[in-house]
Amino acid sequence: MRITMNRLVRYKAFQKLTISYFLLILLTVSLLSTYLFYFFSKSAIKEIDRNSKAMLSQISYASDVVYNQAMTIGNSLLTQPEITSFLNDTEEDKTRNYHVFHQLTQIQSAYPYIYSIGIYRPSTNTVVDTAGLPFDSSLYAISAKQYMEFYPRSLTVPNRNNDAPMQFLTFLLYPNYSLRSASNPLIYINVEEQSILTTIRKIGKSDSANNVFVINKEGKVLSHTDSNLFLDDLSGTPYVQRILSQEETENSFTATIHNEKHLIAYVKSEEMDWYFVSVTPYSGLISNIDHLRNVTLLVTGGIVLIGLLASIFLSKSIYRPFSALFEKIIQNPADLKSPFVDEYQVMAEMFTSLEEREKSMQFVINRSSRTIREHYLHSLLRSHSPDTSVPEELVRNIDEELAASYFCVIVFKIDDPEPARGGTEGGQKPLLRFALGNIAKEMLEPLGACDYLITGENEAAAICQYASNERPEELKPALRNVQSFLKRYFKLTVSIGVGDISYGRKNISFSYISAQQYVKYRLIYGKESILDAQTTRPHIMTTISYPADSEKKLIEAVQSGKPDAIRETTEQFIDQISFGSVNQAITYSNQLMLSLLKHFDYLRHLPDSNFTEYLDAVTEIEAAENLEEIESLFIRYCANICSLIEEKNHWMNAQKHNIVIEKVQIYMQEHYAEPNLSLELVSNIAGLSPSYLGKLFKGSTGQSFSEYLNHIRLEKAKALLTSTNETAAKISESVGMYNAAYFSTLFKKKYGLSPSAFREQEAVMSKEERKRSGFVEVDCRQAAIAQQSPE
């Protein structure tokens, strides 16, 4: 027992196991006890609810009997001749009134719950009431909608019921309902509200604690265990609203009244549209509910205590194999420094450590083997001697895996690799090479053993092993599948060079060199090409001469500045060099670029010209992947030369035009006073057309010829207005403008003042300026005298 308690205090796994069993037992017992208590209380509530509905149904039946008997009394009265004669009389007869009173009294005696029966005859204002009650005029004011109406009321009669209000449920009968008029008689039957309350108490055996009452369809109280609530309107009460809104003839539900839960049960009378309602607090439904709850809790506690002991016993039995394993892992539990031990964590850490060590060793072994294999295959591709430091066993294993007689190297060249979106090119290329390798191995391995190597920035190679000196017929379709897959899912195009088949491992480098040579011919065949000896042989065996005629035509097209001719000649040049080898195409392209550079060397002295792009163009030719790129490069280069030539011509014309504009401006300054000075006159002197000279003038000065001429004349007029006393009209003529009104308009538009106003403003400013200069002169003279006087 001491060992068990020690484990329970110190070892977390044993604690968790014990707590789990205990919680399981506690949960089971709690759920079972709760369910039994709930089931018992629910059943009791249902039984009470059923009894309440049965009681209310009996009360409802009794009320229906009262209603039917009221109908029976009324009908029987109408069948008696003396009563009928009394109703139809138009004169007062005391004897007949007495006989009617006697008959009504006999009928009432048969029905003890009826307080009184009365007849009112409006023609003579006669009232016959068995209880001697005065007639309530409000009864006759009721608007009848059927043969018999019901009217709850409270009536106060002096010297009756200790002057307290009497509470009646009155049934009104209209004998001549179909011929309803102001003189129709009325039969009424008064039933005391207390009689219905007595019926409720007799049937339901309810005491003052119960809340049983009757309401009509408007929510008004017709009878209540609390007589003070008679005729109160309860339609605003939530639970009454719910009763009135439901269509069931009987139902029950729970509601909170004054912060206490109550059971509401009701039954609807089919005859009178009355609702018989019972409202009972939940706490009073089961008298011994608290005792039942306490007993349930006591039994549950005892079972839980037994469950605790059982959980410790079960934990001890199940923990035994686990403790044996833990003791083997931890030889000496005393070495554990913490007073609380989590066995699962200790064992998990131990197993994780062993697993990581094993994975690390396996990773190192696999990585080393893979790295050694890659280095060995690279040395075979480049015909280098293998590393002598590699263990012979690993080399022997690799040679055993390369046991085929024939090998074929396939080179994959990535066309225009683009960086991943949102990433860098350096981070994208390894991903592309990895995807290329996986897809190539998956497609090529069914044809034979295959190894995949990264041989360059955008280049990879596959070493395929075959049993015969022939490539499989399925090789090209498989390579097409590789290209299609990469293009569809990675938006990547790949050109492929298939090397010659070599015999033996030592000759793999010859297959690799031939594959590299073949894949270069994508320059001619374009991207996504599959190139081998058969495809490239026509180009390798063909020698072409340099297309000098195309070079000459291209230079002439560039000199003439014709883009269409440049494009057509460039296409001819590219088409001619496409029949040769790759080396010839690149050499002739560089030669054409050099010829263009030499021929248009005179443009080097043009300002802002930049011929460093020649070196960039040569570099692009060397790196081009297809002839279309070289063709596009030539077109751009020639277009740039054309723009430089155009710029040189424009610059020379601009220099020439500037001289002409300067001469025109000088001429206008000298002859502005001539009234016939015009653009046509000046264009004849300059030797240019008026329209062309006008464009040149506006482009150089930013003003049209007439605007510039008006500017000169207005500036001269402004000076004359300031320095002479000539009239504005005279000054206008002196500057070449003979329309004085037009002169005044232009002057005011330019300077904001009319010529006369401008002259007055200048005169005032000149006077103030002379005055200020006189003050300054006096001050200077006084200062000079002050300096010369002795101190």
Image: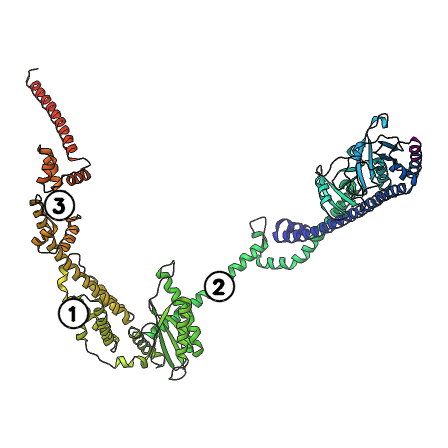
Q: Which residue is mark 2?
A: 359
First along the sequence among labels 3 and 1:
1
Res 548 quadrant in image: bottom left
Q: Which residues are magenta?
A: 94-100
Q: Nearer the viewer, mark 1 or mark 2?
A: 1
- Does residue 625 sit above or below 765 in this rendering? below
Any part of residue 644 in sight: yes
> What mark, if any, has residue 781 been given in the picture?
none
> What mark, if any, has residue 556 been given in the picture?
1
Res 533 quadrant in image: bottom left
Q: Nearer the viewer, residue 709 or 738?
A: 738
* Badge 2 density bin: few <14, some 14–19, many ≥20, Cα 10 Å: few
* Badge 3 density bin: few <14, some 14–19, many ≥20, Cα 10 Å: some
Q: Position of residue 715 (x, y in %)?
A: 12, 40
Q: Nearer the viewer, residue 43 or 300?
A: 43
Q: Which residue is mark 3?
A: 709
Res 598 quadrant in image: bottom left
Q: Secondary structure at mark 2?
A: helix
User: How are the colours assigned in the image?
Assistant: rainbow
Q: Position of residue 301 (x, y in %)?
A: 74, 46
Secondary structure, magenta segment, majority class:
helix
The amino acid type of the residue labelled 3 equals Leu
- Does residue 467 sit above or below 768 in this rendering? below
* Badge 1 density bin: few <14, some 14–19, many ≥20, Cα 10 Å: some
Any part of residue 622 in sight: no
